[in-house]
Image (cartoon, helix red, strand yellow):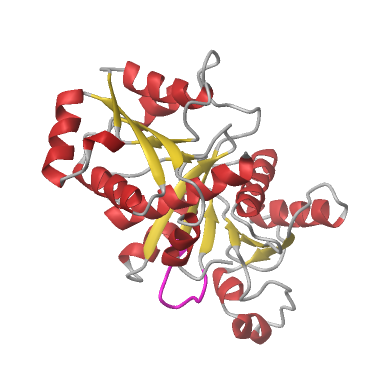
Amino acid sequence: MFRNFNSLIEKVQTIPPTKISVAQADDEDLMLAIKEAMDKSMIQPYLFGNKQSIEKQINNLGIAMKDIEIIHVEGDDIANEAVKLVSNKGADILMKGMIGSSTFLKAVVNKEFGLRTGRLLSHIAALEVPSLDQLIFVTDGGMNINPSLDQKIDILKNGIDTLKFLGYKNINVAILSAAETVSENMPSTIDAAIICKMVDRGQITGAIVDGPLALDNILDPEAALAKGINSPIAGKADIILVPNIETGNALAKSASFLSKGHMAGIVAGAQAPIVLSSRADSMFSKLSSIAISCLMSKGIN
């Protein structure tokens, strides 16, 4: 269990640098995160895009050119070549820079050189908020809009695997809904009940899973007791599995914009970890996302 992003970053500094392939690295906040990660000996970067623009960013930030490899490419080839480097094992993790998500992900799922594994790709957000004494992970608030039961199972498995790669031994998963009772009027509660039964029967392994649970019961054990809910993970959840993208997106962003916390995020289910950063993400958020991907990569490999 990591208490915050700084403890996670410190852990990454104990392992050899990870090779990172960055698609369209022409962005100041991204390059600041790259610089910080290099200063902490976390990464060895390969930067794809317009060489002149990237070199300008590097010079402005005072980064040593000798520690960076720049590959000059333009247009759709930026994403394609960045993905190819990872699929060919020339780099360990992939990162999206100032390039459109659709163009980037099109390269990721390319049948010829992409990073698909057969499992659904899903987004996992890690949240650091002042009111909690540990990082908490939310999935999926970034890729799958209204996942089916089968897709939720893949999303859950991606989340469990991700925490295993990060070194977690005992993983607690809460399935979020607006109520704790199963009702046909609220399909997310039915999906939660089915998933929990699958866990009971060994069809899904690697974690303790409970749901449906409302957010107050997930985060506060006293709230669960007040409602008469005896849950083994109330106040102890490592992962929150959300019913749809709207819920996950709002929950994750509230950590930054309402709680003055920090958010990092990655895409799981691919052959390698993928950092899918947003333009609104801070430098520290990007750095933390890189750190998560570095640890994941060591676990996968």
Residue 188 vs 89, above or below: the answer is: below
**Magenta part of the chain:** 127-134
Residue at 45%, 23% (x, y): give it.
Answer: 85
- Left or right: where does residue 100 sit relative to residue 174? left
Question: Split into 4 quadrants, where in the image is the N terminus?
Answer: bottom right
Residue situated in front as seen by the camera: 179 or 9: 9
- Left or right: where does residue 43 sit relative to residue 234? left
Looking at this view, name the residue that lies furthest to the top: 112
Residue situated in front as seen by the camera: 221 or 127: 127
- Left or right: where does residue 160 sit relative to residue 196? left
In this orientation, does residue 282 appear?
A: no
Looking at this view, name the residue that lies furthest to the front: 66
Q: Where's residue 42, x and y in %?
A: 41, 49
Residue 99 vs 36, above or below: the answer is: above
Q: Where's residue 199, x and y in %?
A: 80, 54
Residue 57 vs 15, above or below: the answer is: above
Residue at 32%, 21% (x, y): give it.
Answer: 78
Residue at 60%, 49% (x, y): give it.
Answer: 162
Query: Residue 166's image quarter?
Result: bottom right
Residue situated in front as seen by the camera: 296 or 64: 64
Q: How many marks?
A: 0
Q: Of helix, strand and loop, which mostly describes the magenta segment? A: loop
Q: Where's residue 178, x and y in %?
A: 57, 64
Q: Where's residue 180, x and y in %?
A: 67, 68
275 is within the stretch colored magenta:
no
Query: Residue 192's image quarter?
Result: bottom right
Residue at 60%, 64% (x, y): give it.
Answer: 238
Question: Split into 4 quadrants, where in the image is the C terminus?
Answer: top right
In this orientation, does residue 153 appear?
A: yes
